[in-house]
Image (spheres, grey):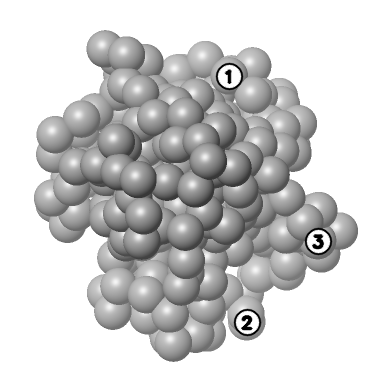
């Protein structure tokens, strides 16, 4: 747990309040989204005076997600998802599904989320409403306009199996690291490069408003399957 009463630089008091806000869980309501500049102010804080960033991220994984979803990223993705049918795989706590449904104005029928919690034990505690506890490989992948996948299991073929199930013309929204990173395997990244086209304009906009945890090199990207 965070020691929020530790001695801090007086100029950083506001950041402690922001950390508290990030950690609020109100019953079945996920923590609020924060803008990019708030996350960056947290990252500039001398964490040695409160806690190491690793422990902050480990806590956030349990109450939100493996990646940061800034308010600005949610706004961009929400506009993109409007009017589309969505399936999110490996949905974890349901934090991302909750906020992107709100941003896009979609119902749970229009935005379906799946996870059987077989890999990341961190998500077996807090779960928000709106995630179907079911193996993601059994989800009707081809029925959706968009598939969302964040931080698929490292060195496993889970991500590869999902993208191979997708049909021509479907969109993939992906958050994770690239080759040599901690998400998916090389076969997944090879398949992504050879069978999908990146939406470069969208991806540049997402890059500008994404925030990363310390030592993490993930990105939000949108792809369209071409074959």
* 220 is higher (above) or lower (below) than 13: below
Q: Quadrant of residue 120?
A: bottom left
The reply to whether discs 3 and 2 touch (Cβ–Cβ < 8 Å) is: no
**Residue at image point 73% right, 59% down:** 207
Kindly report the distance in space between the C-alpha atoms of the residues bearing marks 3 and 2.
Answer: 20 Å
**Residue at image point 24% right, 28% down:** 127
The reply, left or right, for residue 186 in relation to residue 222 is left
Kindly report the distance in space between the C-alpha atoms of the residues bearing marks 1 and 3.
Answer: 23 Å
The extreme right residue here reads 201
Residue 153 percent across, percent down from the top left? 29, 65
**Residue at image point 52% right, 15% down:** 107
Along the viewing direction, whichever of 132 and 180 lies nearer the viewer: 180
Q: Nearer the observer, disc 1 or disc 2?
A: 1
**Mark 3, secondary structure of its residue:** helix
* 214 is higher (above) or lower (below) than 210: below
Q: Residues within 10 Å of mark 2 (few under 14, many from 20)?
A: few
**Mark 1, secondary structure of its residue:** helix
- The disc, 1 or 2, on the residue closer to the chain's N-terminal end is 1
Res 111 visible: no
**Residue corresponding to mark 1:** 102
* 146 is higher (above) or lower (below) than 29: below
- The disc, 3 or 2, on the residue closer to the chain's N-terminal end is 2
Where residue 194 is drawn, which disc sits there? 2
- The disc, 1 or 3, on the residue closer to the chain's N-terminal end is 1
Residue 73 percent across, percent down from the top left? 67, 42
Where residue 54 is drawn, which disc sits there? none
**Mark 2, secondary structure of its residue:** helix
Residue 195 percent across, percent down from the top left? 62, 74
């Amino acid at each position: 747990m965070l020691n929020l009463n530790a001695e801090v630089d007086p100029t950083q008091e506001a950041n402690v309040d922001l950390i508290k806000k990030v950690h609020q869980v109100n019953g079945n309501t996920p923590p609020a989204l924060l803008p990019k500049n708030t996350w960056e102010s947290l990252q500039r804080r001398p964490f040695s005076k409160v806690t190491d960033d690793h422990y902050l991220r480990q806590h956030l994984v349990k109450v939100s997600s493996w990646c940061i979803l800034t308010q600005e990223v949610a706004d961009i993705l929400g506009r993109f998802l409007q009017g589309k049918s969505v399936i999110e795989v490996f949905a974890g706590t349901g934090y991302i599904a909750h906020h992107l449904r709100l941003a896009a104005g979609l119902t749970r029928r229009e935005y379906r989320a799946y996870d059987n919690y077989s890999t990341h034990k961190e998500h077996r505690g807090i779960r928000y409403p709106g995630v179907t506890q079911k193996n993601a490989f059994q989800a009707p992948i081809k029925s959706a306009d968009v598939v969302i996948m964040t931080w698929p299991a490292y060195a496993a073929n889970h991500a590869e199996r999902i993208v191979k199930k997708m049909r021509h013309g479907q969109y993939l929204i992906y958050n994770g690291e690239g080759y040599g990173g901690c998400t998916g395997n090389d076969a997944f990244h090879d398949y992504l490069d050879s069978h999908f086209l990146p939406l470069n304009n969208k991806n540049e906009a997402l890059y500008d408003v994404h925030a990363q945890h310390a030592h993490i090199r993930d990105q939000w990207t949108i792809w369209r399957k071409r074959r």
